[in-house]
Image (tube, rainbow, N blue to C red):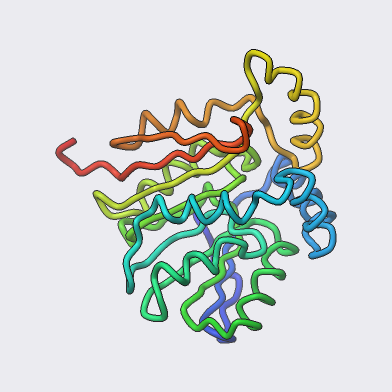
């Protein structure tokens, strides 16, 4: 699926929209986030899913990227821009942040945030993340609470790897079902997953380890969420 430029206009920074090929799964995701993408609705969803821990999870995920001032970072499924403030602190005004998301409703929130903060180094992209065709353009990439949602998630993860220069860092944060005594929480986990159009049974962690060098995993919120971090392999690895 080759992205197509639909429009580009200056605002504070640049905004680009791409369109990938749609299917029933993508339409389901789009419908879901039209319902929950508005600020008040997303705040409710955030509390239900994170119990106030969302800022901690996002900040720690960004920290795993080991970004430096002036670097470029790709935020896949950026949503309403919830990672942007942490990314801004990491790369500074001389850095570059590109956020891509399929949902126009979520991106509207991101654009509102960018305007409000007057960030001039943020680009917003609308489209299917699986259709990304960046090649070694970024120093790092992250995807938070989204590989469990994106229909073509394996292609998206491979696209993230391709987008990052060899040795650049790639981080993923997502939820998982419990094992052992934590299985008692799985009914709620599956209910929440259905609300946000997520599939909690995907082996994201296994696929990540196949593609990423020096993969590490950190669990948070009593094992309900995890952060995967590592680096893009060099051609000789």
In the picture, measured across the screen, residue 170 lies left or right of residue 122, that is: left
Which residue sits at x=30%, y=52%?
168
Furthest residue in direction left, as rendered: 236
x, y percentage for residue 66? Answer: 34, 56
Of the pair 110 and 158, the residue shown nearer to us = 110
Q: Where the C terminus falls, by quadrant? A: top left
Q: Position of residue 156 (x, y in %)?
A: 50, 44
Front residue (pair 93, 161): 93
Farthest residue toward the top? 180
Q: Position of residue 194 (x, y in %)?
A: 79, 35
Q: Residue 18 vs residue 39: left or right?
A: left
- The residue that appears at 56% across and 66% down in the rendered structure is 125
Q: How many marks?
A: 0
**Position of residue 147 in the picture relative to residue 161 (left or right):** right
Q: Nearer the viewer, residue 8 or 186?
A: 186
Residue 177 sits above or below residue 54 on the image: above
Please give the name of the residue rendered at 66% of the width and 29% of the height, measured from the top-left corner. 200
Quarter of the rendering containing residue 105 = bottom right
Residue at image position (64%, 51%) is 54
Residue 52 horizontal/vertical position (percent): 71, 51
Q: Is residue 1 visible?
A: no
- Quarter holding residue 15: bottom right
Res. 100 in view: yes
């Amino acid at each position: 699926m080759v992205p197509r430029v639909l429009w580009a206009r200056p605002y504070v920074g640049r905004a680009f929209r791409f369109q990938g090929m749609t299917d029933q799964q993508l339409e389901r995701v789009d419908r879901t986030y039209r319902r929950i993408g508005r600020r008040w609705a997303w705040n409710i969803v955030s509390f239900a899913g994170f119990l106030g821990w969302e800022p901690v999870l996002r900040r720690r995920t960004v920290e795993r990227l080991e970004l430096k001032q002036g670097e470029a970072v790709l935020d896949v499924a950026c949503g309403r821009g919830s990672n942007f403030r942490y990314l801004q602190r990491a790369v500074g005004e001389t850095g570059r942040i590109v956020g891509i998301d399929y949902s126009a409703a979520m991106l509207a929130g991101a654009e509102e945030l960018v305007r409000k903060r007057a960030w001039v180094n943020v680009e917003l992209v609308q489209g299917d993340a699986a259709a990304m065709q960046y090649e070694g353009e970024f120093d790092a990439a992250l995807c938070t609470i989204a590989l469990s949602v994106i229909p073509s998630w394996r292609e998206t993860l491979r696209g993230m790897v391709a987008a990052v220069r060899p040795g650049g860092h790639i981080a993923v944060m997502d939820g998982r079902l419990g094992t052992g005594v934590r299985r008692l929480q799985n009914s709620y986990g599956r209910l929440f997953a259905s609300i946000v159009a997520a599939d909690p049974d995907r082996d994201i962690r296994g696929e990540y380890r196949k593609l990423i060098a020096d993969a590490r995993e950190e669990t948070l919120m009593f094992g309900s969420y995890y952060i995967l971090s590592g680096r893009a392999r060099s051609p000789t690895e």
